[in-house]
Image: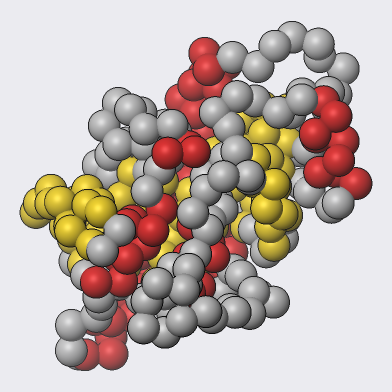
């Protein structure tokens, strides 16, 4: 039996998924607008890859069409979503290159469309439970893949989502830390909520690329050049974890159908 395609969503520094074979780029029309995806196979399994910011990082985080993206993945038959979030560290114990398997979030955004259930559809107003926004079984797959791949992945972390595209102030980071935030980013919300509303299993790896403003001793401004330098040395660890997860699934599928 053919498995449903696995969705992979990524952002800054992850504009292509080189491991994909037999790739086809498509624009998927949804009620919320079009979403561009790349379909292909990875270790023989069907995969749909979506880069949030578009080609060449042309879409800022506050203008990403999160509803179209998630709706397109659901319409393509995806059931599981693996997300990659490039983040700053709120926790001073985290350093560039560290990986976290997220388990909760803070929504500090202000003006984004946050839900499919805005009252305009036939389902009316719906209140979705987010006790476990990141799916436990999918998180476990990521953690086991990280062990097998030899890349440390911290079990648990709270993602503080800010509006962007500017970086956060030191006061905002202090607020997020008081609320329990471990890392800060600009794209994880509402993506995780929309996946929950669409009935998709969703898990996310956060890659730390810089200390947030006011964290640690450095008073140097945050620059994209510094972030890209960390990405150049750390993105392969993220891809290795994902590769191990997909390979394990492919092996399980072969054994189950053999």
* Residue 189 left/right relative to 183: left
* Residue 96 x %, y %: 66, 30
Q: Nearer the viewer, residue 118 or 85?
A: 118
* Residue 175 x %, y %: 86, 40
Q: Which of 226 and 153 is in front in this view?
A: 226
> Which residue in the rendered view is the most extreme toward the right?
178
> Which residue in the rendered view is the most extreme toward the top?
220
Q: Measuring 36% from the left and 83% from the top, which residue is drawn there?
A: 122
* Residue 89 left/right relative to 120: right
Q: Is residue 43 visible?
A: no
* Residue 169 left/right relative to 29: right
* Residue 47 x %, y %: 25, 62
Q: Measuring 54% from the left and 65% from the top, which residue is drawn there?
A: 193
Q: Measuring 54% from the left and 28% from the top, which residue is drawn there?
A: 165
Q: Which of 257 and 103 is in front in this view?
A: 103
Which quadrant: the N terminus? bottom left
Q: In this view, does 113 lie above or below 89?
A: below
Q: Is residue 196 above or below residue 170?
A: below
Q: Measuring 30% from the left and 58% from the top, which residue is drawn there?
A: 32
Q: Is residue 255 above or below residue 102?
A: below
- Tally of numbered discs: 0
Q: In which quarter of the image is residue 105?
A: bottom right
* Residue 2 left/right relative to 251: left
State the colouring used for the structure image: secondary structure
Q: In this view, does 29 lie above or below 250?
A: above
Which quadrant: the C terminus? bottom left
Q: Is residue 17 visible?
A: yes
* Residue 233 x %, y %: 50, 27
């Amino acid at each position: 039996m053919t498995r449903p395609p696995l969705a992979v969503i990524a952002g800054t520094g992850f504009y292509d998924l080189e491991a994909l074979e037999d790739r086809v780029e498509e624009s998927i029309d949804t009620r919320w607008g079009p979403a561009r995806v790349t379909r292909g196979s990875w270790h023989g399994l069907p995969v749909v890859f979506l880069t949030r910011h578009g080609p060449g990082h042309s879409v800022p985080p506050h203008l990403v069409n999160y509803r179209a993206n998630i709706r397109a993945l659901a319409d393509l038959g995806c059931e599981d979503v693996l997300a990659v979030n490039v983040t700053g560290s709120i926790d001073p114990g985290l350093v560039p290159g560290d990986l976290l398997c997220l388990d909760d979030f803070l929504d500090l955004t202000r003006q984004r469309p946050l839900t499919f259930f805005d009252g305009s559809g036939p389902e009316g107003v719906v209140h979705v439970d987010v006790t476990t926004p990141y799916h436990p079984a999918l998180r476990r797959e990521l953690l086991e893949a990280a062990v097998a791949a030899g890349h440390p992945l911290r079990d648990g972390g709270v993602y503080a989502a800010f509006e962007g595209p500017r970086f956060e102030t030191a006061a905002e980071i202090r607020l997020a830390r008081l609320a329990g935030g471990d890392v800060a980013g600009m794209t994880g919300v509402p993506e995780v909520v929309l996946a929950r509303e669409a009935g998709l299993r969703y898990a996310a790896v956060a890659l730390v690329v810089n200390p947030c403003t006011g964290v640690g001793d450095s008073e140097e401004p945050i620059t994209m050049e510094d972030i890209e330098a960390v990405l150049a040395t750390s993105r392969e660890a993220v891809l290795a974890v994902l590769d191990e997860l997909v390979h394990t699934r492919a092996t399980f599928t072969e054994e189950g159908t053999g």
